[in-house]
Image (cartoon, coloured by chain):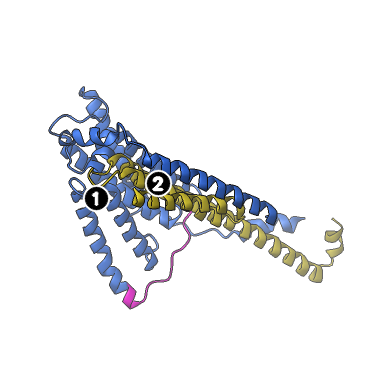
Chain colours: A blue, B yellow
Amino acid sequence: MNRDLSLLIGILVALLAVLLLGVFHSTLALDPGQRLASLALERLPESGVSNPVTAVLLNYRAYDTLLELAVLLAALLGIWSLGPARPGFQPAGPALAAMVDWVVPLAILTGGYLLWVGGHAPGGAFQAGALLGAAGVILRLAGNAGAGLPSEAWQRWLIVLGAGVFSLIGLLLALTGYGFLSYPPGQAKWLILLIETAATIAIGVTLAAAYVGGRPQMAQPPRSPLAPMADPEAKR
Amino acid sequence: MTAAFLYGGAGILLFALGLWSLLVHEPLLRKLIALNIMGAGVFHVFIAVAHRGDGTPPDPVPHALVLTGIVVAVSATALALALHNRLEQDASDSAQSTSTSTAGLLSGLSISPQSDIIRHE
């Protein structure tokens, strides 16, 4: 790019940053006024969980989380539509393999803990799912080409599990007269835990599959890209 | 107040740096990293806004929005990386096929007696 132009862009962006900093500073100096925090904390005992962030994610703004799971699903479908995955790395050396044998079960165990603790302390489906996904990444880096994931048919079921269970529970609640994703009093905790468990598995599998970076390899042999290309050139 | 301003101000600076890099640099991978840095800056500002004084508990709504945002950013980055990978693969494939076809043409020139016809076509 032209040097003068990039300098001009730099000056403009710096001016924008100064403007934003000024706005942010004056916003912080203002009186907070009426905020959502007090409302969210006030209704917390009814929400089924005692961690306010989980209450916002799975109860007050459950739509957000449902759509987020849909975004994850759409992103993975986009990745799979781009073609098969590239081959993985070489099998790991003995030291890395021994470490992976320890780290992967620990990550899965910690993921389960984070899922449960999300009800009353920082944690929840996303943190737990991220750990499961990280376990998959470690497995692939250590030479397991499929990142420890099951066959493609199973993966398809697992990645729709999160959004599927979420919308099914929402629809069941709507049909029984409570309204879409508004939980009946007293049962919110178990419904949230069920949704979060499904979401954790779906997020973990989706992240690991996204790291693999393509559709799971089938049994078919990879076609040679050169053979069909050479024909039209030879005819000319 | 000062801590919140420093934290959020760092987020605004990250946003500005990412925006500059996104606009100035040509390679797609750099643009993608710049977009992620911009996103991290926005998350910083959200977290800074959630904290209002030590006496009151932080606002859970921006925290939840940031959690949602992180997951969406990660999945969008994964999709963008896959697209980038595919673009590069296609570019290298077409470069390879043109180079092999020229190589085939050259070997044909040296062996085949019809090389003149091929050249005239």
Instruction: Specify whether residue A88 is painted magenta.
Output: yes
Q: Please state if A124 lies on the left or on the right of B6 as rendered.
A: left
Amino acid marked by disc 1: Gly
The residue beneath circle 1 is A123
Q: Judge from the rendering whether residue B76 lies leftward or rightward of residue B89; answer left or right.
A: left
Residue A86 position in % (x across, y down): 48, 60
**Where's residue A196, x and y in %?**
24, 44
Q: Is residue A35 left or right of residue A220?
A: left
Asked which quadrant contains residue A138, the reply is bottom left
Residue sitting nearer the eye, A218 or B99: B99
Q: Report which quarter residue A145 is drawn in.
A: bottom left
Q: Chain of mark 1?
A: A
Q: Which residues are magenta?
A: A83-96
Residue B45 numbered mark, or none: 2
| Neighbours of disc 1 within 10 Å: few (<14), some (14-19), many (20+) | some
Q: Is residue B77 magenta?
A: no
- C-alpha gap between disc 2 and disc 1: 21 Å
For label 2, the SS is: helix
Q: Quadrant of the N terminus of chain A?
A: bottom right
Residue at 23% over, 63% down: A106
Q: Is residue B84 visible?
A: yes
Residue found 25% across the figure and 25% down from its top = A179
Image height check: is A222 above or below A123? below
Coordinates of residue B53 in the picture (x, y in percent): 28, 45
